[in-house]
């Protein structure tokens, strides 16, 4: 998972301070670290969150997170989607797959779509 975080970071060049660590925590962290990173990301400018979108999707697909993590993840993703039409379009294309999300993730994801 660390390699994925490094690849994501390199695709976007210079990252907002803290984005790389947030991505790493989203991909590798336990519920508490993920929740802390979501709080950090939600306070960043939208363009700084964009490199973390793949990691945010990964959180939504990961079983065992609590409903607050899923809800906060969906809100951060929504923040980016509202600014970038291409991101919004891609997230909407996932709507038929909502039933495959882990328990607790479906409702927050559906609300954000």
Image (cartoon, rainbow, N blue to C red):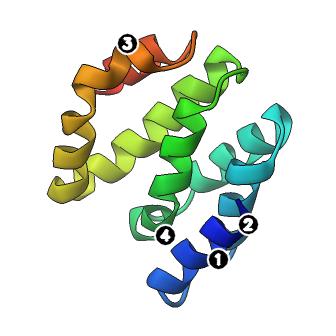
Which residue was labeled with disc 1?
Answer: 6
Q: In percent of the image, x 66 and y 45: which residue is there?
A: 39
Residues under numbered marks 1 and 2 in contact, where contact means CB atoms less than 8 Å apart = yes
Which residue was labeled with disc 3?
Answer: 99
Residue 75 picture quarter = top left
**Residue 62 in sight here:** yes
Q: In percent of the image, x 73 and y 20: which residue is there?
A: 64
As helix, strand or loop, the secondary structure at mark 1 comes to helix
**Residue 16 in sight here:** no
Image vertical order of residue 89 relative to residue 74, above or below: below
| Disc 2 from disc 3: Cα separation | 28 Å
Q: Is residue 36 left or right of residue 104?
A: right
Sequence order check, earlier mark of 2 and 4 = 2
Image vertical order of residue 64 relative to residue 61, above or below: above
Sequence order check, earlier mark of 3 and 1 = 1
Q: Is residue 49 left or right of residue 6?
A: left
Sequence order check, earlier mark of 2 and 3 = 2
Sequence order check, earlier mark of 1 and 4 = 1
The image position of residue 16, as x and y in percent, is 58, 78
| Disc 4 from disc 3: Cα separation | 30 Å
The image position of residue 11, as x and y in percent, is 46, 82
Q: Which mark is residue 48?
A: 4
Which residue was labeled with disc 2?
Answer: 2
Residues under numbered marks 2 and 3 in contact, where contact means CB atoms less than 8 Å apart = no
| Disc 3 from disc 1: Cα separation | 30 Å
């Amino acid at each position: 998972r660390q390699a994925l975080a490094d690849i994501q970071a390199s695709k976007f060049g210079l990252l907002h301070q803290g984005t790389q660590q947030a991505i790493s925590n989203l991909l590798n962290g336990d519920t508490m670290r993920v929740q802390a990173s979501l709080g950090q990301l939600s306070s960043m400018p939208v363009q700084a969150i964009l490199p973390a979108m793949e990691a945010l999707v990964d959180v939504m697909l990961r079983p065992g997170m609590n409903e607050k993590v899923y809800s906060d993840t969906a809100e951060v993703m929504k923040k980016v989607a509202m600014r970038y039409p291409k991101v919004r379009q891609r997230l909407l294309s996932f709507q038929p797959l909502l039933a495959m999300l882990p328990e607790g993730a479906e409702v927050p994801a559906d609300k954000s779509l």
